[in-house]
Image (cartoon, rainbow, N blue to C red):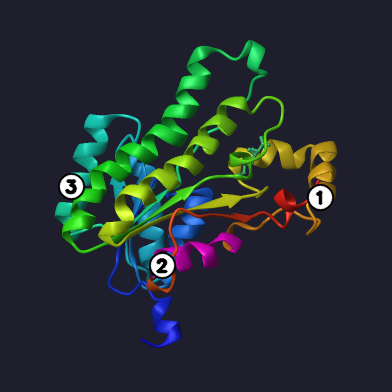
Amino acid sequence: MSILTKFSLQGKTALISGGYRGLGLSMATGFAEAGAHVILNGRNSQAVEAVAARLKESGLSASAAAFDITDEASASAGIDKAIEENGQIDILLNNAGIHQRYPLAEMPLDAFKTVIDTNLTAAFLLSRLVVKQMIENGGGKIINICSLMSDLARPTTGNYAAAKGGLKMLTRAMAGEWAKDNIQINSIGPGYFETEMTQALKNDEKFDSWICGRTPAGRWGKPEELQGLAVFLASPASSFINGQLVFVDGGLTSVV
Ligand code: GCO
């Protein structure tokens, strides 16, 4: 296989949770441009269908799968339907994530639970729902979207950091159980990227200049800068990499 073919996703089907916007959509677009059929997930079917239609208009292979990743019955039915409609799921990108920022001492229990459910538990649930058919098909790829907050926290993000720290270890646990079945499970740790989730932070001049000073690259990341690593981890080129977390953060987690 030539080296460029090793990076191709031709003939693969990828399911991306929260894949209709932000970083998830950017990585889904990268998968599609590398040849995959991408299934975009979100709760709102209208929004997801519209974005999938936009990708198709630009010549990419895309479809929608609207279901709630935090609800076992909804996720199970959604995954079954996606497999029935597409034959199989070769690549799962556990991307969906939310923030509900509070100082820990004032954080409502619901805010803690909801962030853990969406950012961590859902990755377990979706992976468990797709792994059996990956094993039957001779292998697959699971990519968990961790964060710089898998290793570093800051005030008001305790729920998010706990979830992303847990996701780093869940990645390793999955590798420990499923690598033998030719499934590679790795994670990506974005640093600060300008998305809906961080728009308010980016617009805050003090925070923006702190991040640009704290990040050796001196800037925020662009969503398309996640595509290369995502495609690599989804491709045959990473067939002997397992349980790893790779930061895409301009060097932020490498310096004090
Ligand atoms: C914050 C930010 C961070 C980053 C995220 C990137 O509140 O400091 O939202 O959580 O966006 O960690 O991976």
Q: Nearer the viewer, mark 1 or mark 2?
A: 2
The amino acid marked with disc number 3 is: Lys
Name the secondary structure under disc 3.
Answer: helix
Q: Is residue 158 above or below residue 244?
A: above
Q: Position of residue 198 (x, y in %)?
A: 65, 40
Q: Quadrant of the C terminus?
A: top right
Residue depicted at x 61% and y 26%: 158
C-alpha span from label 1 to label 2: 35 Å
Residue depicted at x 68% and y 18%: 103
Choose between 195 and 150: the one closer to the eye: 150
Residue at which label 1 appears:
212
Q: Position of residue 5 (x, y in %)?
A: 39, 82
C-alpha span from label 2 to label 3: 31 Å
The amino acid marked with disc number 2 is: Phe
Q: Nearer the viewer, mark 3 or mark 1?
A: 1
Q: Position of residue 188 (x, y in %)?
A: 53, 53
Answer whether labels 3 and 1 touch (C-beta < 8 Å): no
Q: What is the total number of numbered labels drawn onto the structure image?
A: 3
The amino acid marked with disc number 1 is: Cys
The residue segment tinted magenta is: 225-235
- Label 3 crowd (10 A; few <14 / some 14-19 / many >=20): few
Residue at which label 2 appears:
240
